[in-house]
Image (cartoon, helix red, strand yellow):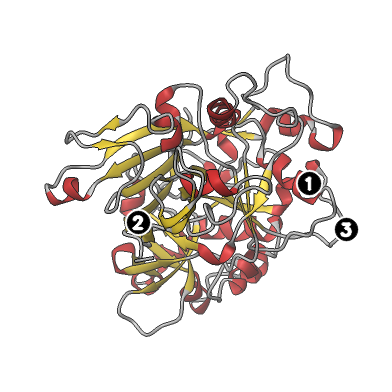
Amino acid sequence: MTDTINETHGPHLRSWVESANTPEGDFPIQNLPFGVFRRRGKNESPRVGVAIGDQILDISAGVREGLFNGASGEAANACVSDSLDALMALGPRLWSALRKRVSEILRTNSRDYERNPALAARILVPMAEAELLLPAVIGDYTDFYASIHHATNVGSMIRPENPLLPNYKHIPIGYHGRSSSIVVSGTQVRRPNGQMLQEQSETPRFGPCKLLDYELEIGFFVGQGNTLGEPIPIAKAGNHIFGFCIVNDWSARDMQKWEYQPLGPFLGKNFATTVSSWVVTLEALAPFRVPMFARSEQDPKPLPYLTSHDDQQNGAIDITLEVYLSTQKMRDRGIHPGRLSRGNFREMYWTVAQMLTHHTSNGCNLRPGDLMASGTVSGAANDSYGCMLELTWRGTKPVQLSNGEIRRFLEDGDEVTMRGFCEREGYMRIGFGECRGVVLPALAS
């Protein structure tokens, strides 16, 4: 993935949308993430927008105002749609042209705005008046296992003497998930029923999951796909990645433990996966690329098809990730959610380019709008673990919340909120918004 820092990342850029100029905000003019929305209470179709401060730039409205032409016009016309899939299919040149033009429209010295300040009311929709929807029609979903800290922790619970299996440092491990149960942030999640084997029992039972968990992950959307049978080289992987979101891959640990052998994740994983509403483009993240972090000199070098100099130097991304928990009692008493963990995506063992390249290495074809997720993002420190399985060490070390409640795993009424942001000296902070969901009780079995 090459360095694409350009004028849109300028730290001194400001917007005539005043809420975008707040230092701690997620959506300054340097970000410009894409999403899909519709106004609440209106009988209108979903459409593509760009987040700017506490507003949404309606791309379709901008097209009607004649704000786009040439390459940006071609990309903007693809946004006259109810999903990002058509835009994702166009490729980096047109993505970049649209991003640059949106930046020009929203800057404080925008000629478009200076000529016609009334433009704001015609192209902006307040986020408070919008319903945010899934950003893409997700055809396929693949979840990886790319954090060596997470893999080591989970492995040590099962195999204390040999936590990592022999293949881990050679191959990006993943599994195919279920796209039909991917939901947007804010959607309530039903506790699943399933089959589990209780301790000291020889026969399984069927009923509500007892060990419900979250998994903090980063997801990335495929842009242009590839032809069946034609792998994507690692040097070109970045051309096929449109952007990133936060993912909560909800997990039923007791169901998962019983069913995962010999074929891996199934019903313990596919009942719900939550994604954040806004897709932060790969281009927006250019200032926050960093060298690969988690590998040591003693580790085996990746095979040649998973190796490029640029990916080694710029393939990791410095994204701070946080998880907050709010119980029903906390909300009833007006107590703010408590932070459970803070980690960083730069500590992953495998880069997104390696994940994508490996996915296609056997000729598997990817399509615009396909979603891939990193697997749980965990660091080396206890307070950076990305799931309750690790935080409570399989429930043996319960977490005490600020109001005195205890959690080993998630209980009904618990609300999990995940946030992510990027910071670097000399650049504007950008964020991902929220990935949020409340746990509902299981249906009677």
Q: Nearer the viewer, residue 110 or 28?
A: 28
**x%, y% of residue 69?**
62, 70
Mark before the other along the chain sequence, 3 or 2: 2
Please name the residue that numbered disc 2 is placed on. Answer: 17
Q: Which amino acid does the dot numbered 2 rest on?
A: Val
Could you tell me which secondary element the residue under label 2 belongs to?
loop
Q: Look at the picture and state if 78 lies above or below 429.
A: below
Q: Nearer the viewer, mark 1 or mark 2?
A: 1
Discs 3, 2 touching: Cβ within 8 Å? no
Label 1 neighbour load within 10 Å: few <14, some 14-19, many 20+? few
Regarding residue 248, the answer to whether it shows in the image is: no
Q: Nearer the viewer, mark 3 or mark 2?
A: 3
Discs 3, 1 touching: Cβ within 8 Å? no
Q: Which amino acid does the dot numbered 3 rest on?
A: Gly
Discs 1, 2 touching: Cβ within 8 Å? no
Could you tell me which secondary element the residue under label 1 belongs to?
helix
Q: How far, Cα to Cα, is label 3 from label 1?
A: 16 Å
Could you tell me which secondary element the residue under label 3 belongs to?
loop
Label 2 neighbour load within 10 Å: few <14, some 14-19, many 20+? some
Q: Which amino acid does the dot numbered 1 rest on?
A: Lys
Q: Residue at x 64, y 47 (%)?
A: 264
Q: Nearer the viewer, mark 3 or mark 1?
A: 3
Q: How far, Cα to Cα, is label 3 from label 2?
A: 47 Å
Q: Residue at x 41, y 83 (%)?
A: 44
Please name the residue that numbered disc 3 is placed on. Answer: 229
**x%, y% of residue 141?**
62, 57
Q: Which mark is residue 214?
A: none
Please name the residue that numbered disc 1 is placed on. Answer: 236
Q: Quadrant of residue 25?
A: top left
* Residue that protrudes farthest toward the bottom in the picture: 43
Q: Look at the picture and state if 78 lies above or below 165.
A: below
